Image: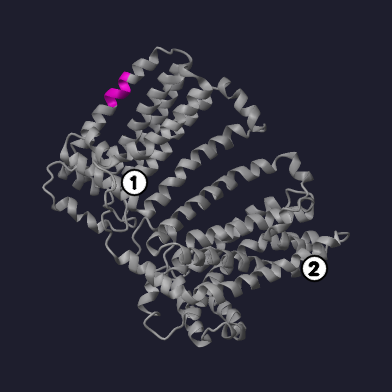
Amino acid sequence: MLNKLLLRLVMLFRGIWTGMGADTAQLANILAIKLVMDDRKPMSFGRQRKQKKDIKYATWLSVVFSLLTGFFYLFFLFGIKDPVSSLFMYFTIFLFMLTFTLITDFSNVLFDPKEKYVLLPRPVNDKTIFLARTLHSFIYLFRIVVPMSLPGWVALGIQYGWQSAVLFPFVLVLMVFIALFLVNACYLLLLRFVKPEKFKEALSYFQIVFSILLFAMYYMLPRLMENNMSEQLNISANPLFRLLPSYWLASSWLWILPGAATAFRWYSLAAVLFPVLCLWITVRWLAPTFAARIGAIDASDAVMPVAAKRTQKGKRFYSRVADMVNRNDTVKAGFLMTWLQTSRSRTFKMRIYPAFAYIPIYFIYMFLLNGQSVSAALQHLPEKKNKLFVLLYMSTFVLSQAITYVTISDQYKAAWVYYASPVGKPGNIMIGAFKAIWIKYFLPFYTAIVVFALYFWGIAVIPDLILSLLNVSLFSLLIMRIAYRCFPFSKSEQINNAGGRTMIRVFLTFFTIGLLGAAHYFASTTLPWLLYVFMALSCILLWLVWDSYANTSWADMAVADE
């Protein structure tokens, strides 16, 4: 019902779509099929288990989730006294979230390779295909935006009267169009100036940056809004803010607010003209080659990668590292395959790279912005050694994320090569994968933490740095030994990776590393000589777990799968 209503709403503008060069009959049919397929997609939180049936009401579940998210935006709407400034903050976070959703979730909608098998061989012009994808994204967004905006809609209607309640839907539509066409224009510009084989890689890094920004805003903005300066914030006094689309949307309320500055009312016209201008530019200039560019991307994915030519003499860096840290050829093979696959997998990089930014952001949120300025917090940081231990053991998140996703792949069926190879101990391949993850991802990140710690706490914390490195490595290897006794990139994400017993074991492992961290802090602050005893114990435990994992047999893997 909801999809049919939105489809009819979109097709009320048949004249506009015809004027842009689209076939409205084809456009309506394509959109109808896309909306039916949306309702049949499984929810993202259900991927960890097998689903025998499609979820028919995925649309309504997303509506409920969006409604709950909308209550979070009320914090920005009423955190500032100046109405235009509060509306500016509200629409800024709303517009950012819409843009982020487009970039992260709708890249598959905008660049769905499956359509080439259905639409491209048929007499459907480029403008119809482009408008179908754009309007589909608009409908998809609108189903999210309407429930997400309901709390703000009601709140603004209560605060500013019925005029605000009538104005809000029109501003909401303009905001959706601004987010949609800005992202579409960026995509199409990338398609025009970036080589097809590099497009998806560039898009992946774009998504990574936005996910980091979203995480930073989620934690930092509420803390910054607690500052009393936010109450006196006046966005209109700064001419730079007037150039932003969120200010154009907020200035629309100046027409109904009593005693508002009339000079800034006319900025609301930009909110109307800007989406129209973006639509005209993208459809007239960028869309004509849209289908051809999409086909080029799909063709680049179908071509097998060719080994790059060596421009320098000798082996590559990762080959030299593999020779240095591996004596066994089987271990070396697992090391090299994991190193190369993690570099080529866009999905793996999108899951791992943000973790490197999450830890410093969360550390700043917990300590450096605790009711004081950054300079004051840094000045008193050396006096609080407990913060060092929190930072050191927070680094576990990076390594645990990497070892969690190193076993998962969309092309997991390619793991047959492991079983077809004459490998006596499969644990050698798995321990090689752990070495690659530890050296490639964790060691550089931990080195940065070491430099930070030495700068603020001095060389006296070197024993703490060594012991925490041993404990974090032991913890991560325990996780792999208990929960991930399998080859790298050999499991499907839809497979239930373990039962309740494994969850209990993982919990016990976390509890163990928590005890190690607590014992570390106790020894460092009361009996420093115990640090060296714990180092010896950690080394022994690490060696025992390492040996057990490296000697994993085929029978052990079968038991782990069961």
Using a 10 Å C-alpha cutoff, classify the residue at mark 2 as few (fewer than 14 neighbours), some (14 to 19) or many (20 or more). Answer: some
Principal secondary structure, stretch drawn in magenta: helix
**Rendered location of residue 376, percent (x, y):** 65, 27
Say what secondary structure mark 1 lies in: helix
Tag count: 2
* Residue on which disc 1 sits: 500
Question: Image point 12% across, 42% down: which residue?
Answer: 424
Identify which residue, 443 or 510, lies in the foreground.
443
Disc with the residue nearer the chain's start (2 vs 1): 2
**Rendered location of residue 289, percent (x, y):** 46, 75
Q: Which residues are magenta?
A: 536-541
Identify which residue, 273 or 221, lies in the foreground.
273
Type of the residue with mark 2: Gln
User: Is residue 539 found inside the magenta-colored segment of the image?
Assistant: yes
Mark number for residue 163? 2
Say what secondary structure mark 2 lies in: helix
Using a 10 Å C-alpha cutoff, classify the residue at mark 1 as few (fewer than 14 neighbours), some (14 to 19) or many (20 or more). Answer: few
State left or right for residue 487 relative to residue 177: left
Type of the residue with mark 1: Gly
Image quadrant in which you'd find residue 116:
bottom left
Q: Is residue 482 visible?
A: no
**Rendered location of residue 170, percent (x, y):** 70, 70
**Rendered location of residue 386, percent (x, y):** 52, 24
Mark number for residue 484? none
Q: Report the Cα–Cα distance between label 2 and label 1.
A: 55 Å
User: Is residue 471 found inside the magenta-colored segment of the image?
Assistant: no
Q: Is residue 476 visible?
A: yes
Select label 2 or label 1 by which is in front: 2
Question: Image point 37% across, 43% down: which residue?
Answer: 402
Q: Quadrant of the N terminus?
A: bottom right
